[in-house]
Structure formats: structure tokens, C-alpha cells
Amino acid sequence: MKNKDRKEMNRRDFLTLTGAGTAATLYGCKPKNTVSAEGGAIGEVPTDKMTYRINHNTGDKVSLLGYGCMRWPLRRKADGSGEEIDQDAVNELVDYAIAHGVNYFDTAPVYVRGWSETATGIALKRHPRDRFFIATKMSNFSDPGRQASIAMYNNSFKALQVDCLDYYLMHNIGPGEGMATFRKRFIDNGILDFLIEERKAGRIRNLGWSFHGNVEVFDYVLAMNVRWDFVQIQLNYQDWQHATPERTNAENQQNVNAEYLYGELVKHSVPAIIMEPLLGGRLARVPSRALALMKEVHSESTPAQWAFRYAATPENVLTVLSGMVYMEHLQENIRTYAPLVPLNEQEYGTLEKVTEILIDSDYIPCTECQYCMPCLYGLDIPDIFGHYNRCVSAGKILKSANDENYRQARREFLIGYDRSVPKLRQADHCTGCGICKSHCPQKINIPDEMRRVNRYAENLKQNTNF
């Protein structure tokens, strides 16, 4: 009974804090596509019903769906020498997004192997400048020197083909050595002062930062004597109160619950931009038990739609970023936010039950962000974890050779593993060097998880008990 009372209080607190249930700004409709990313019917994709939020600092009317440009589609080069951005596909996605009301595009110098800003700039340059807001970042991780940082900043203007950056972020503060890393990247080199002067000069319209990691850095930067126009945080229904999995080693427990981050932004009247609404896609492919709970409430809604509605319901959220590589994902997300129907109390209760299932599962908390890549030893870390997590979602991670459907699940894992990840890039080639650990925003002990995946795969190969 006490546990139930605690959950009811959490739900009421969330509804109060986020302002759930209030009316959103809505606009008109036109039929386009009627197929969801899961293949089911989702209805028309409107062109003029997008929900917008107002940035009270500048008056910007920002689409609630923001386009995350971290994962643009790739294609093989014509000469077969490697991969490149599929610019035609990027142009098509950007055109469709703008035509359907999306006006916020988020990129960074380090995204898509350093190609994202250029590809995004090419696609957006074909549209009137007042049809979109562009966000990019100071990604001075490898060289925080003042000269290199300013050069990175200036190059963003060239790559994006603009003379003004609508939203500019100090990228990913909090990881590494916490305050020491933050000071090295932005204070000791004078870069924060430089960016404030650039805002005064009008070359930056909104100045903010994105956060992963050490809460001390978050609290310090938020309380600085600086007017922050926005802050980008990770928020989804699992991370609201369970940002750090219980099995994670104490030394890595640096992620911060979204409940705290969002609440602090509300206190300081700073608009929130949301990243990882699907937690790297995991909330789009929930275990069958969790999916059944969702279908009891909304038989036609996909898990992704639940997650996107959750992330957008809080009133202080300016936009929710989604890295949409495929047209059907873009169409489904537009449909979810055109218009947004805020979650109600019953739906929050359902997601609390779903979260309990998720945190009790064997998921590796990888969002496939690619920050750990390239691996010095050639491992494909995101695809290894992605394949394992997809098997978790499907309920096909085996506990014993005596499990029901053992043969089928064993075959599916091993064949799927070889198809997803070339053999020389699989977990058994991990040396445990640990270089990747400091780059992971989710604070995953990557070598430990590699050993876990490899033990599981080897047990399956040898048909031994676990």
C-alpha cells in the first residue's frame, strides 16, 4: 500500500510540475501518409497542425518536434572507397519536415563523422532563412585551446552557410573530470566570455548548453551569472527517476534523474530542449509485457508515440529532438505532434508500470550515440549493444539451455549477431583498454558490458548452461 501511495504522489507531482493537461497551440491539416514506422495505420500526416512552443527569451515560435541531425542517412561512394552522406535523402527529409511544420534543426561539428553540419547546411540553404532555426555546438572535446575552439565556431558558419546561429550550445558539459573539464573547455580559455560577446554582437541569438554527467557541473553552470536562453537535457519516462541503472558500478553513477534537471530549469525559468526521448531507440522497442500494458490503453499507439508524448507534455519543454533517418519515422513523429495530445494521469500510471519492467530487464543503457567510436581496435560498440538490446526487447535473452524455445532463440541471436556486426568487430575482440568509457554520456562501463555480451554469445555457441 505504501508503495502504491508513493507512485500516486510521484504521478501527481509530475502533473503539477510539468503542467500536464493544459491546451497546446494547434494549427490545420492535410492528408499525406497513413503508415506508421511499425507498419500500422496512423492516420493523415498534417501539414499545418504542428504544435509550437514560444521561447520567452526571444519570442521564437519553435516546433515541438525538433530534427536531430546526428544520424543522417549514409550511402556507399560511387567508387566503392567508403561511405558518404546521402545528400539527396537528407534534402528530401528536410524538405518534408519543413513542409509539415518542423523548424528546429540540431547539429554539431562532430556528428556523422564530421559531415553533419555541411549536409544540414546544404539542405537548409534551399529554403528561406526565416523558415528554420539552426542549432549547433562548441564540440571542443579533443582540443579545448582558444584558437582551435574559435576556429571550430567560425567553421560552423561556413559549413551551415549562415551568418547567424539561432541556438548555440556548449556541447556535452558534465563528463570527464566534471568541473575541471568544464573549466578547461570553456572558462580558462575564455571561450564562454567569447560566446557571450558573440551573442551581444548578434551572431548568436540564443546561448545555452547540453548536459550529461556530473550534477555538480549542472548546478554550477545553471547558477552562473549568465543569462541562459535554453538548456538541453536528456528526458524520457525511464530517466525521469531511473537515469542510472541499479547494476551500474558506483564509480560510474553520474547520470542525473530528469526529474531533478527539469525541475531546476523550471525554477530558473530556462526553457528545456529534450534529447534522447526514446533512450537511443530502446523505448521504441519495449519488451512484450510492457507493450501489452500500452496496448490495453491505446491499441493503435506505438511505443515511440507514447515516449514522444511523454517528453513533450511538460510545458517548459521548447522542442523534443529526434534523429530521424527514415521517412516513416519522420512522418510518425509529425503525426504525434500535429497536434500534441498531452498525457493524462492514467497514461502516466501505465508508463510507471512499463518503467518497472524496463529497469528489471537486461538492457545495456546504450543510446547508440556513437560518441565511443571509432574504437582503436575496430569494435562496432553501438551495433554490438544494439543487437543485444533488440533481443532483450523481443524477450529472447536466454537464462538456461533448458529455456523454452532455446534452439530458436539461440539461432536467432547468433545469426543476427553475425549479420549485424562483422566477426572481427564483435565483443570477443575487446581488449578492455577502457578508452571508450570516458566518452560515453550514459556512463556505461563498456569493457564490462562487452565481456557480458561475449560470455553470453560464447555460451550459446558452445551450447553450455549459463
Image (tube, rainbow, N blue to C red):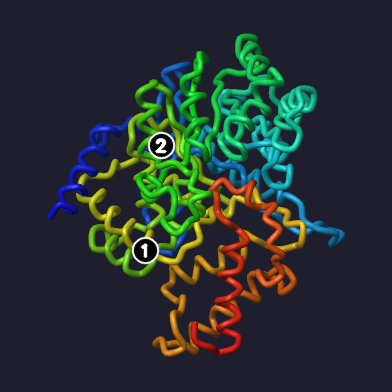
Residue shown at 38%/49% (left/top)? 242
Q: Is residue 458 above or below residue 61?
A: below
Residue shown at 40%/65% (left/top)? 361
Q: Is residue 61 above or below residue 37?
A: above
Say whether residue 241 is visible. Answer: yes
Left or right of 298 in this view: 274: right
Residue at mark 1: 360
Q: Residues within 10 Å of mark 2 (few under 14, many from 20)?
A: many
Q: Are marks 2 and 1 in contact (CB under 8 Å)?
A: no
Q: Which amino acid, by three-letter code, is at mark 2?
A: Met
Left or right of 320 in this view: 173: right
Residue 50 numbered tag: 2
Q: CA distance from mark 2 to mark 1?
A: 36 Å
Q: 107 or 381: nearer the eye?
A: 381
| Percent of width and height locating residue 286 | 40, 63
Q: Which amino acid, by three-letter code, is at mark 1?
A: Asp
| Percent of width and height locating residue 362 | 45, 66
Quarter containing the N terminus: bottom left
| Percent of width and height locating residue 424 | 74, 71
Q: 415 or 306: nearer the eye?
A: 415
